[in-house]
Amino acid sequence: MTEIKPSKKIYKSTDTANPISPNIFCADPTCIEYEGRIYVYGTNDHQQYEGVGKDGKNSYEKIKSLVVFSTDDMANWEYHGIINTKETAPWIVNSWAPSIISRVESDGLTHFYLYFSNNGCGVGVITATNPLGPWSDPLGKPLIYQNMPGLENCPAPFDPGAVIDENGTGWLSFGGGTPPRGDMIYTKIPKIVRLGKDLLSLDSEFTIINAPYFFEASELNYINGTFVYSYSTDWQSRDNWTESKIPAPPICSMGYMTSSDPLNQDSWKFGGGFFLNAGDSGMEWCNNHTHFTEYKGIKYIFHHTMHTQELMGTTGGFRCMDVDYLPYTEKSLPLTKPTKEGVKQINPLDPFVLHSGAEIFTCADIGYEPCGSGKMSVKSLDAGGWTMIKNADFQKGANKIKVNAKGNGRIEVRLDDINGKTVSVIENNSQRAEFSGTVTGNHDIYFLFSDKDIILTDWIVM
């Protein structure tokens, strides 16, 4: 049997949790919890990357889709492929920076409302009754657009932030663009509006959120009765800051505002900067876009960096989604920063239930292939490609593995080390393979592919 040499094209370490995806460029995360899983949606920078190549620039104009990942352990992320926004809503220019909310409606189903930036010229919304779609376009046009009646001083009405408060009322923040002067602290550009009961219309006038050093990346959260608005600050000098009670937000960091009465402009209070630029953590400097969530009792902040492109050796500005802990309290958001380490796995993976081949912690020389019913498979891009699953619990003891695979060649199963001993071999698309002995305890699982174009759809141990 010919020895397989594992690929060394690794763009996410086996011992650091960031980024979420080791091989898909994506940014501007938002998320929703559904049936025990967290679903994360983001801007599909990879579409731009594929359109312009490794030496091209991320100027965003080719991005007309969104990406979706999910997890139930904050370590192993399943890639669900793209939402083809252009196909769903043909009128769009682009689709960037999504924000998602959901609610159970009169038909007993959970309805999902996914708002997105239509380039920089507005906000669109698509809907579904499953977090993975199918998606539909209920309006056939933008919800927010430039120069619409009542909307003033908002050059780029994009980057939506949607939330539903404790009374079931929906809210939408948005905004971006360059002020008349480059040295303005308060531009009055970002806006908030109350949504109609259908979450597809507007039910108030636009109100200013007068955020200091505002740049872009509006996001809206509702925490213990308080609206928390977060945004990316600009790059200008802070020499003109005159407030004495609170420091100026660091350059190109994330700042926040709070209010309990969002349509009262004077109620919005600046809380300070709370999340530093990736450059402050030794990574490439870039803008950011954050989203807060609490999952299984732990508070997280989703954001993006350009760490993957650093490891790939490209410099086009292609981003990757990350997650870190968010130490917020009822009173404040302490200043923290992005990390490469990310967050800890919150529970071991159960290998005795069926798992998609596209659910991984990291990989090398791996791509994806649709396999029907909205599911994705992994596909080896070259001989020696591999995937890794983090911390699977074999406590009951497993003697065999069942797979759904195709392609010419074999898949070797290894535990804890890609260069370790092979414990099982799947050959010629066989559906079951014995382990070399009973496997117990907790292990990382590696699937190593002998040849190019081998596809692994799903697997389960027995």
Image (tube, rainbow, N blue to C red):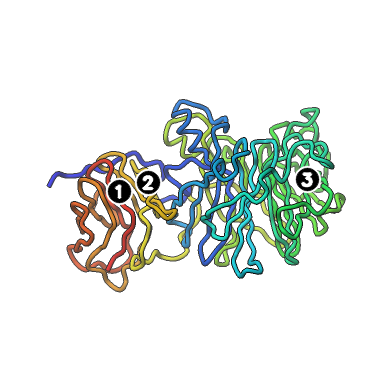
The three-letter amino acid code for the residue at tag 3 is: Lys
Above or below 20: residue 184: above
Q: Position of residue 289 (x, y in %)?
A: 62, 44
Residue 25 horizontal side relative to residue 140, left or right = left
Q: CA distance from mark 3 to mark 2?
A: 40 Å
Q: Which residue is mark 1?
A: 455
| Dot 1: element | strand
Q: Position of residue 296 (x, y in %)?
A: 55, 66
Q: Are marks 1 and 2 in contact (CB under 8 Å)?
A: yes
Q: Position of residue 260 (x, y in %)?
A: 80, 59
Sequence order check: which comes first, mark 1 or mark 2?
Answer: 2
Question: How crowded is the residue under tag 2: few (<14 C-alpha within 10 Å), some, or many (20+)?
Answer: some
Q: Position of residue 178 (x, y in %)?
A: 74, 31
Q: Quadrant of the C terminus?
A: bottom left
**Residue displayed at 72% across by 58% down:** 198
Q: Nearer the viewer, residue 371 or 308?
A: 371
Q: Which mark is residue 369?
A: 2
Q: Which residue is mark 3?
A: 191
User: Is label 3 or label 2 in front?
Assistant: 2
Residue 69 horizontal side relative to residue 183, left or right = left
The three-letter amino acid code for the residue at tag 1 is: Ile
Q: CA distance from mark 1 to mark 2?
A: 8 Å
Above or below 438: residue 361: above
Which image quadrant for residue 130?
bottom right
